[in-house]
């Protein structure tokens, strides 16, 4: 796969970024900490999707060593316990997921959106994305609405942004993404702003650019470049005040982990991954708590 052919160059970029970022360590805030929790009780998996509804986290779908799976699991942070729900009833892979209001939403290839109601433990197909299909579209949530965009498809690179309103179940085309169209983009939201970027360009260049989206003005603005993580291996999450992008290459201990502060428009290195068992990890934020589940069943809480 062509993404992996650039891995050695990418890892060199990590070293460059880390060295540049560590020039003035005395001015940096203290790093966060990682806390090991109970392991996930199901079979280990990669490429699962995750979202949060209320005070529970959910993971769905995924790929084991032998097959795609349709399982759905609910995580209770107060009990540090997982509860298996009904399987996802449709054939699907890839995509992205987020929580909006009292439901979870999952967009899967080619461009189909499904909603999950935890009260009924049931899925329902929603109106499809009006534009072209894509495998690894990204999304973020602001004020109970979902914003989906970018990625590539057989027709070429896409740099659109679509708003989904769960009240009307309608789609609205928003301002075109200001950055270069890319595959496997990363995204997160902090407060009333969304952030999108990085990824792999159509010319196979590893991108570091980050852009901020303001739904009030429907405008994008360029922010400080982030880190050149290999997009297919990276995972992201956010707290109320910061965004995080982390490497998730299997077998690499103390892997790079970066924090973006929107107040200072600055990236810093944070507490590195505590485990080498983190290929394509899944992450979600429940209230003020951040959880990461690795591809091989380890569950960690990140404490900023």
Image: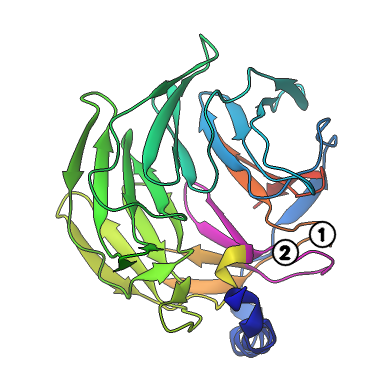
Q: Residues within 10 Å of mark 1 (few under 14, many from 20)?
A: some
**Which residue corresponds to mark 1?**
274
Nearer the viewer's eye, disc 1 or disc 2?
1
* Residue at mark 1 to residue at mark 2: CA–CA distance: 8 Å
How did the renderer colour the structure? rainbow
Residue 254 is covered by the magenta coloring: yes
x%, y% of residue 271? 72, 64
Circle 2 SS class = loop
Let me know if residue 288 appears in the view.
Answer: no
Q: Which residue is drawn at 68% across and 56% down?
A: 280
Q: In this view, does 229 lie to the left or right of 36?
A: left
Quick one: 91 or 177, which is closer to the camera? 91
Q: Is residue 187 left or right of residue 64?
A: left
Q: Quadrant of residue 225?
A: bottom left
Dot 1 and dot 2 residues touching (CB under 8 Å): yes
Quick one: 252 or 154, which is closer to the camera? 154
> How many dots with numbers?
2
Residue 242 is covered by the magenta coloring: yes
Residue 23 position (above or below residue 59): below
Q: In which quarter of the image is residue 4?
A: bottom right
x%, y% of residue 252? 82, 69
**Which residue corresponds to mark 2?**
271
x%, y% of residue 71? 67, 29
Residue 304 position (above or below residue 90): below
Q: How crowded is mark 2: few (under 14 residues within 10 Å), some or many (20 or more)?
A: some
Quick one: 153 or 117, which is closer to the camera? 153
């Amino acid at each position: 796969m062509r993404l992996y052919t650039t891995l050695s160059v990418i890892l060199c970029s990590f070293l460059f970024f880390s060295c540049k970022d560590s020039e003035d360590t005395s001015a940096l805030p203290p790093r966060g900490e990682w806390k090991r929790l109970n392991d996930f009780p199901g079979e280990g998996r990669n490429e699962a999707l995750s979202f949060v509804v209320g005070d529970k986290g959910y993971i769905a779908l995924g790929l084991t060593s032998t097959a795609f799976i349709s399982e759905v699991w609910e995580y209770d942070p107060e009990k540090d316990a997982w509860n298996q729900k009904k399987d996802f009833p449709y054939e699907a892979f890839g995509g992205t997921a987020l929580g909006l209001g009292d439901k979870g939403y999952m967009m899967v290839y080619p461009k189909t959106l499904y909603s999950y109601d935890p009260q009924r433990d049931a899925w329902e197909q929603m109106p499809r994305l009006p534009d072209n299909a894509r495998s690894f579209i990204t999304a973020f949530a602001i004020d109970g609405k979902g914003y989906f965009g970018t990625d590539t498809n057989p027709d070429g690179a896409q740099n659109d942004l679509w708003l989904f309103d769960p009240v009307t179940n309608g789609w609205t085309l928003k301002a075109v993404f200001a950055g270069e169209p890319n595959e496997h983009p990363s995204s997160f939201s902090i407060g009333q702003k969304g952030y999108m970027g990085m990824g792999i360009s159509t010319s196979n260049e590893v991108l570091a650019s980050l852009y901020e989206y303001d739904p009030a003005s429907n405008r994008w603005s360029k922010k400080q470049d982030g880190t050149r993580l290999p997009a297919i291996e990276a995972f992201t999450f956010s707290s109320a005040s910061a965004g995080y992008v982390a490497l998730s290459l299997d077998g690499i201990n103390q892997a790079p982990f970066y924090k973006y502060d929107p107040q200072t428009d600055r990236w810093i290195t944070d507490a590195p991954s505590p485990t080498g068992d983190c290929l394509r990890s899944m992450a979600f934020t429940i209230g003020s708590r951040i959880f990461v589940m690795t591809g091989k069943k380890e569950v960690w809480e990140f404490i900023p």
